[in-house]
Amino acid sequence: MKNEQQRYQRAKMRVEKEKGFYNHLTVYIIINIALLFINSQVIDNGIDSLLDWKLYITPILWGIGLLIHGITVFNTNKIFSKDWEERKIKELMDKEDF
């Protein structure tokens, strides 16, 4: 029963982390669309104003932070994952048993 409760707590924590990431993604999209619209001045200057590189500094830097957030939440690091750790520990333990 205790193991089941621990699994539930880990799953709940995982869901909270994913929820936090999706909230971050939603805010990123909404805010950056608004900033692009406000700062681009398309109405006054036409479509050429979208080529100004300064418009994209905030989305790029914030996007890097969002990417890092996503990597930490979804644990895409397969090289040093929990399975890798367990395999490496077993491998080192087997070497000592000779």
Image (tube, rainbow, N blue to C red):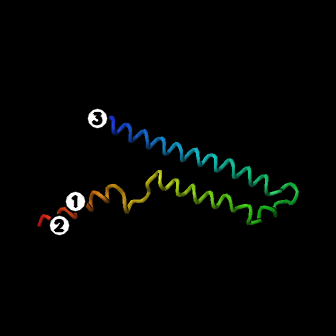
The residue under the point 43% across, 41% down is 13
Q: Earlier in the sequence, mark 3 or mark 1?
A: 3
Q: Is mark 2 on a helix, strand or loop?
A: helix
* Residue behind mark 3: 2
Q: Kindly indicate the quadrant of the structure image that contains residue 55.
A: bottom right
Q: Position of residue 50 (x, y in %)?
A: 77, 61
Q: Residue at x 36, y 57 (%)?
A: 81
Q: Name the residue under label 1.
A: 90
Q: Which of marks 3 and 2 is nearer the N terminus?
A: 3
Callout 3–callout 1 Cβ contact below 8 Å: no
The answer to whether 78 is drawn above or below residue 19 in the figure is below
Q: Which residue is drawn at 53% across and 44% down?
A: 20
Q: Position of residue 84 (x, y in %)?
A: 32, 59
Q: How far apart are marks 3 and 1 (CA)?
A: 26 Å
Give the mark, 2 or 1, whose residue is nearer the N terminus.
1
Kind of residue indicated by mark 2: Lys
- Per the image, the residue denoted by label 2 is 95
The reply, left or right, for residue 41 in relation to residue 1 is right
Residue at image position (77%, 52%) is: 37
Query: Does residue 81 appear to the left or right of 86 in the view shown?
Result: right
Mark 3 vs mark 1, foreground winner is 3
Secondary structure found at label 3: helix
Q: How many marks?
A: 3
Disc 3 to disc 2, C-alpha distance: 34 Å
Q: Which mark is residue 20?
A: none
**Towards the viewer: 26 or 2:** 2
Quadrant of res 4: top left
Q: Where is residue 88 in the image (x, y as percent from the top left)?
A: 27, 62
**Judging from the image, what secondary structure is the residue with disc 1 in?**
helix
Q: Which amino acid is tagged 3?
A: Lys
In which quadrant of the rendered image does the C terminus lie? bottom left
Q: Position of residue 85 (x, y in %)?
A: 31, 59
